[in-house]
Amino acid sequence: MLDFYATVARAGVQEQFQYRAANYLYMIGMVVEPVIYLVVWSTVAAANGGELRGFTAGDFAAYYIVWTLVRNMNIVFTPFGWEHRIREGRLSGMLLRPVHPIHYDLAYFAGWKVVAITLWIPIAVVLSLVFRPTLSPTLPQVLAFLLAIWGAYVIRTMLLFVLGMVTLWTTRVTALFELYFTAELLLSGRLVPLELMPAWAERVADVLPFRWTFGFPIEALVADLSNAELVAGLGMQVLWSVIGWGLAMWIWRRGIRRYAAVGN
Amino acid sequence: MADVVVDDLERVFRVPVREAGLGAAVRSLYRREHREVRAVEGLSFRIEPGEVVGFLGPNGAGKTTTLKMLSGLLHPSAGSARVLGHEPWRREREFLSRMTLVMGNRNQLQWDLPVVDSFEMNRAIFRIPRAHFEAARDELVDLLEIGDLVTKPVRNLSLGERMKAEIVGALLHRPQVMFLDEPTIGLDVTMQKRIRTFLGEYNRRSGASVMLTSHYMADVLALCERVIVIHHGRILYDGALSGLADRVAASKTITVRLADAHAALDGYGRVLARDGGRVTIEVPRTDASRVAARLLNEHEVSDLTIEDPPLEDVIERVFSDGDAAAASAAVRSGSPGSAG
């Protein structure tokens, strides 16, 4: 299986490096979102006497620059892609292989991360020079962060695989996907650090998976988390990975019976 | 033990229906109607190891649906099937590693990668030992003469080149059972011939069993000794290719070369063509020997052949029959039953 993962990931790297310009434009587009959040929250902090509930402008800068890397790690095969996969019959080719498609998705997009991180580094340098982040992580935080970004990737792959499989029941489910992404935006730490949300929202976020795909990896590096909190956070990621895997396999077994193999 | 065993296989699709127009579209918002389409009905057959079987039928007959069930893409609605001892739709690793499905209009290679890298990915996916992979790749590349193409990205290949690369990719793991769905569709005559020669050679070398659908009768004639003919999801004929004409075609053609280019030929049969002394006559199948003997007795003949009508005509006759049940009865009567 390691050979499979390495080979498919390598193919992902090869394919994505062929589209360097497209990837760069994609990433630049992606940077616009956190820069808007960063400017807004920095302005609010400045108007509030230099900080907002403990967040200084430098803290916001650190949060949203790390955000850009975590966002890249969050890119997985989207549920929208499932529509194409099913309507065009692309899933048929995957079903003929003696490897579950989820392994292919995990391996391929892991390869893409290599390209994304390579292209991200100069962008992060420019953002750091412009916004001056306050960032002084400890070694355990750095190690936890390196694990957490991959944990986030695994969880989000599982969840979006589950969501995408709804397409096996009904072909057009864009509205459902949008509902999911709105909830994720609010309760993951993507729009705003969860610490700035009302207490009840933070409690809700704790029991949902979104936080562990976005907020936690960022906090692991930029917030003042104890070692115990880091381990607990990684534990939650393991838990959600297992839940996501179980859910994905359970729905797959039911959904695939409905696959009509159209499009070829 | 047979490689493929199919018993009463059935697949029903539930498809939404609505009338044309805005009113019908609005009504379908709150009341959706469906109808059942029986794509495959009660198919039963076996394929023995090494057999090459042509699976023939008009568009919509159920050929591709059957192949999709046998390769594990579709679950059947009823009946059973076992391929290499496995229930296909369970898609066990052991099963998927020993079979392949090639669809002529479907690209399974990596679009943006050079062909060799796609092959490499298949090596990892099918867990083919490196030495076996390299031997198989080199042999197949050589057989299909695509050595100069393998470094090109798949997206830059022509349809024919891509099809050859697809076939190599699909055979790297040396499958024991091959399902080929229109493998030569859209290709020029030369490329069709090369691919069918290759498939015949692969079958001889590997002993793999093959189930092939094609609308090109040349594919069937070159590769298949046995054919299964289906129409509206049901088997109309299962037996030797040579026996199909016996069952279906009511006539034979006699082509004769006469010394007298103006000889009277009334009473022999329907003259289809006359070019000087060369005459083609259609006669009732049961009268063919008697008419041939008469021609030899009554004329100076330098050459004479008796042939079945072209396979295309035979197949067309089966499918164009307005009453499918009658066609079914026609081909089933005295069915050779070689498929058991």
Image (tube, rainbow, N blue to C red):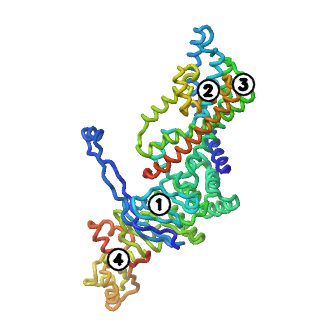
Crowding around mark 1 (Cα neighbors within 10 Å: few <14, some 14 to 19, many 20+) is many
Q: Which residue is farthest bottom?
A: B297
**Inter-mark Cα distance, 2 to 3:** 15 Å
- Say which of marks 3 and 1 sits in front: 3
- Which residue position holds label 3? A137
- Could you tell me which chain the residue with mark 2 belongs to? A
Q: CA distance from mark 1 to mark 2?
A: 48 Å
Say which amino acid is labelled 3: Pro
Can residue A253 be seen by looking at this rendering? Answer: yes
Residue B165, located in which quarter of the rendered image? bottom right
Dot 4: chain letter: B
Depth order, front residue of B187/B316 = B316
Q: Which mark is residue B181?
A: 1
Judge if badges 2 and 3 mark residues of a common chain: yes
Question: In the rendered structure, which amino acid carries the disc numbered 2?
Answer: Trp
- Most foreground residue, A191 or B311: A191
Find numbered disc 2 in the image and state the secondary structure of the residue it sits on. Answer: helix
Separation of residues labelled 4 and 1 (CA atoms): 26 Å
Label 3 marks a residue whose chain is A
